[in-house]
Image (spheres, grey):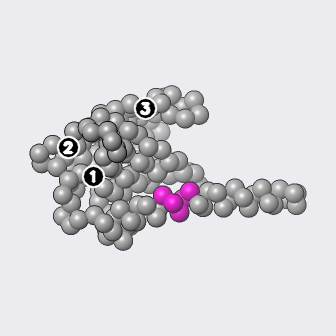
């Protein structure tokens, strides 16, 4: 490796590690604060996504919370993994209503960064389960999540 590239590689590694640690730290804090049993569908979720197009799959984390100062709107803060050490973080803000039973019906669309088109999601979250389908440019599949343990696993 060219010696001039070592500082650049180190800076990239630190930046990636920092982003990863920041998300996982927030996820662990949300998991530790989650009441048992959960009061409603908000909070941390842990599971997988799977493509119906090519069978690819990967880990998926999500923190669901009401959007500050926007009643009737929720932020779905995702972290998805695929391939070897490839992760993406994004927040999908969508209108969603908390039902009397604590569930949330999810239906929304957002533009993905980097020219990847639109992302559409449909699903339902109860206090203990989160199942949804997604559709984006060239792909569609499912997301299946459950509540993490109090340690964030």
Residue at (20, 43) in percent of width and height: 98
Callout 3 crowding tier (Cα within 10 Å): few <14, some 14–19, many ≥20: some
Q: Earlier in the sequence, mark 3 or mark 1?
A: 1
Q: Residue farthest to the bottom?
A: 151
Q: Residue farthest to the left?
A: 100
Bounds of the magenta span? 19-23
**Image quadrant in which the C terminus is located:** bottom left
Residue at (57, 51) in percent of width and height: 86
Instruction: Write down the quadrant of residue 29 in the picture.
Output: bottom left
Q: From what the image shows, is residue 73 above or below residue 31?
A: above
How far apart are the two marked residues, 3 and 1, measured between alpha carbons?
20 Å
Q: From what the image shows, is residue 113 above or below residue 91?
A: above
Q: Which residue is mark 3?
A: 110
**Image quadrant in which the N terminus is located:** bottom right
Residue at (64, 57) in percent of width and height: 15
Is residue 105 highlighted in magenta? no
Q: Check whether the beta carbons of the residues at disc 3 and disc 2 lie within 8 A of each other.
A: no
Q: Earlier in the sequence, mark 3 or mark 2?
A: 2
Residue at (23, 65) in percent of width and height: 35
Q: Check whether the beta carbons of the residues at disc 3 and disc 1 lie within 8 A of each other.
A: no
Query: Which element carries disc 2, helix, strand or loop?
Result: loop
Query: Which element carries disc 3, helix, strand or loop?
Result: strand
User: At which x and y percent is residue 72?
Assistant: 26, 38
Query: Which element carries disc 1, helix, strand or loop?
Result: loop
Q: Which residue is mark 1?
A: 42
Q: Earlier in the sequence, mark 2 or mark 1?
A: 1
Q: Which residue is mark 2?
A: 98
| Foreground disc of the pair 3, 2 | 2
User: At which x and y percent is residue 118?
Assistant: 46, 29
């Amino acid at each position: 490796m060219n010696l001039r590239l070592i500082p650049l590689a180190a800076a990239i590694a630190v930046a990636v590690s920092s982003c990863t640690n920041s998300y996982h730290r927030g996820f662990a804090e949300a998991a530790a604060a989650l009441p048992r049993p959960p009061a409603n569908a908000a909070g941390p979720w842990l599971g997988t996504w799977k493509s119906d197009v090519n069978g690819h799959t990967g880990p998926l984390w999500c923190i669901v919370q009401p959007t500050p100062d926007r009643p009737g709107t929720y932020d779905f803060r995702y972290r998805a993994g695929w391939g070897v050490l490839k992760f993406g973080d994004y927040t999908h803000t969508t209108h969603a209503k908390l039902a009397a039973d604590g569930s949330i019906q999810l239906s929304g669309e957002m533009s993905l960064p980097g020219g990847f088109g639109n992302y559409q999601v449909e699903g339902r979250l109860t206090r203990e389960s989160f199942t949804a389908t997604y559709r984006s440019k060239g792909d569609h599949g499912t997301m299946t999540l459950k509540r993490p343990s109090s340690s964030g696993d």
